[in-house]
Amino acid sequence: MIEFLVMAFFVAQPMPAAAAPTDGGTPPAADAGSASQGPLGPVDLKEPVQITADLIEGGKSQATLTGNVKVTHRTLVLKCDRMTAYFTQPRVVTRVVCTGGVNAVDGDRMARGERAEYDVATGVLVVTGSPEARQGTTYMRGTKVRLTLGSERLDVENAVIIFESPPASSPAPSKRKGAAAPGRATPAPSEPGKANPR
């Protein structure tokens, strides 16, 4: 079976359109090359939400994506098995809901679980379904994990926290070749025919 990779670009926050030129020429945004040409005209994206998946089925206000779903927005990378994206016209994503094998990474913070809701405007990701989180060397699990983009804050409800020690900076002492292990004596070599004294 041939699978098609479908890539959908949605706009998180549209930029205001460039002012009409006063000299009758090309608008400044088109001259600067900052706008790309879309199927319906120039598109200038500010903080786009990029979504990829194996299959997409959509309507006027939402789309369902399945298979290897990946959402990228600002510093967040969110992966899952199935996602529903909710949007307004003209295709401005407002919220995404992910289910199955959810894994989110934002800098040194990570969260995973079975379900996640991401509010695009606020940058808040909420993970549920046996969620786990990690920030640096701290591992947490609980009933709900809340991660906010642009903040170092990570909230975990009903948390169990494990603080990992950073690796030791000094190497462990090495054993010298032929040196005895501590607490054990090495018997002296014996002469043939004589027993070792104890």
Image: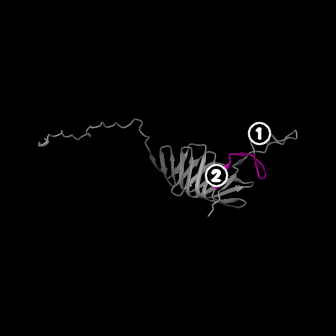
State the residue position of label 1.
32
Which residue is at 64% across, 52% downward? 119
Report the residue at 65% width, 53% height from top. 51
The amino acid marked with disc number 1 is Ala
Label 1 to label 2, Cα distance in Å?
32 Å
Query: Does the image show residue 102?
Result: yes
Left or right relative to 77: residue 175: left
> Residue 72: x, y in percent?
63, 49
Q: Quadrant of the C terminus?
A: top left
> Of all residues shown, which one is farthest toward the front?
192
Residue 164 shown left or right of residue 99 in the figure: left
- Assess disc 2: are there few (<14), some (14-19) or many (≥20) residues with their C-alpha within 10 Å of its C-alpha: some
Residue 186 colored in magenta in the image: no
Q: Residue 175 at x, y = what percent?
A: 31, 37
Say whether residue 45 is magenta: yes
Where residue 176 appears, x then y in whole percent?
30, 36
Instruction: State which quadrant residue 33 falls in.
Output: top right
The residue most toward the bottom is 1
The residue labelled by disc 2 is 119
* Residue 198 appears in the figure: no
| Sequence order check, earlier mark of 1 and 2 | 1
Q: Which residues are magenta?
A: 36-52
Taking 5 as reference, is 26 above or below it?
Answer: above
Q: Residue at horizontal 70%, vertical 55%?
A: 87
166 displayed left or right of 177: right
Q: Amino acid at mark 2?
A: Asp
Callout 1 secondary element = helix
